[in-house]
Amino acid sequence: MLVTGKEILQKAHEEGYAVGAFNTSNLEMTRAIIEAAEEEKSPVIIQTSQSAITYAGSEEIAMIVRQLAEKASVPVALHLDHGTDWDVVMKCLRDGWTSVMFDGSKYEFEQNIDITKQVIAIAHPMGVTVEAELGKIGGVEDHVKVDAKDATMTDPAEAVEFVEKTGVDYLAIAIGTAHGVYKGDPELDFDRLKDIKSRLNMPIVLHGASGVAEEDIKKAVSLGVNKINIDTDLRQAFQRAMHKVVKEKPDVYDPRKMLQPTSEAVKEVVKTKIRMFGSNDRV
Ligand SMILES: O=C(CO)COP(=O)(O)O
Ligand SMILES: O=C[C@H](O)COP(=O)(O)O
Ligand SMILES: [Zn+2]
Ligand SMILES: [Zn+2]
């Protein structure tokens, strides 16, 4: 069934586990993610970046995810990932997303509050719940390269003020993760996470979670992370499976036969993440 992000994340917050938010841009990835969630009896969030929407088309990708979600035996939310463009956020609200992220991390604190509030004022009456970002998450983020060293971590006191002033439903924080492929091992600031969670009684979001060690993910979940974004790990599973097909079966030219192994590979990664995050057997 299709639900809002908050329906999924509030329960995760209350019961102490995290739900995977997996990026999609087509039918195959979407189907693989939903099948994995169904097999694991887990709620799931399917998210589209702005560039995924440019690639697939807003109405087209919404139709694919919503149709599959409505038929699914588990709760599924359709979420806009890193909405930095006001018009795209508004279009997603009109086209049937059930959750949107307004990413105002490039703005000063007060301006981030201001625009986030405006998004919420429109989204909430439409029954759509909202994620915001405070601090700067490093890595490649929708055409903006944030140098990992310059990425600023979320200030716990600012987080409290931000949530009080905006009324945001779930908050993405910067605690040392980065988008894309890690060059070294990421170092997570668990004390900062603990401090933020103790001050905020709400779901917390972790971005850039691909490539983070299982024990660090589990620790982050135990300290209160409830939404975990995964994109790169799925892309790499797709890539490996695609390369294998091309190498081992160079004569196959039916796109369905070429894509089948990539879907299976993506599905396996999603299932592994679901168990790692502790959202299996929750439905
Ligand atoms: O945070 C993400 C999407 O918002 C995903 O990050 P990764 O690509 O590092 O998994
Ligand atoms: O956070 C970034 C996501 O991995 C989306 O990346 P993308 O803009 O290439 O779709
Ligand atoms: Zn951001
Ligand atoms: Zn992200």
Image: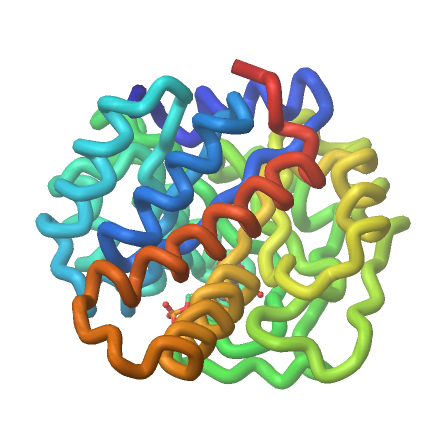
> If the picture is divided into quarters, which one holds ligand 2?
bottom left
**Residue found at x 63% / y 85%:** 147
Task: Point out residue 221 in the picture as x, y percentages from the top left corner.
Answer: 75, 38
For the question of whether residue 54 can be seen, the reply is no
Query: Which image quadrant for residue 97?
Result: top left
Q: Tell me if 259 is positioned left or right of 278 in this view.
A: left
Q: Tell me if 48 is positioned left or right of 205 in this view.
A: left
Eyeballing the image, is 41 above or below 190?
A: above
Q: Which residue is the extreme one toward the right?
A: 191
Eyeballing the image, is 47 above or below 188?
A: above
Query: Which image quadrant for residue 282?
Result: top right
Q: Quadrant of the N terminus?
A: top left
Query: Which image quadrant for residue 81?
Result: bottom left
**Residue found at x 84% / y 58%:** 189
Q: Tell me if 216 is positioned left or right of 50 in this view.
A: right
Eyeballing the image, is 206 above or below 238?
A: above
Q: How many marks?
A: 0
Which residue is more in the foreground, 76 or 201? 76
Which residue is more in the foreground, 144 or 271? 271
Task: Point out residue 142 in the picture as x, y percentages from the top left corner.
Answer: 39, 73
Which residue is more in the foreground, 224 or 246? 246
Task: Point out residue 104 in the picture as x, y percentages from the top left corner.
Answer: 44, 60
**Residue found at x 35% / y 76%:** 249
For the question of whether residue 35 can be seen, the reply is yes
**Residue found at x 85% / y 49%:** 215
Task: Point out residue 118 in the picture as x, y percentages from the top left corner.
Answer: 31, 44
Q: Tell me if 243 is positioned left or right of 138 in this view.
A: left
Q: How is the image coloured?
A: rainbow
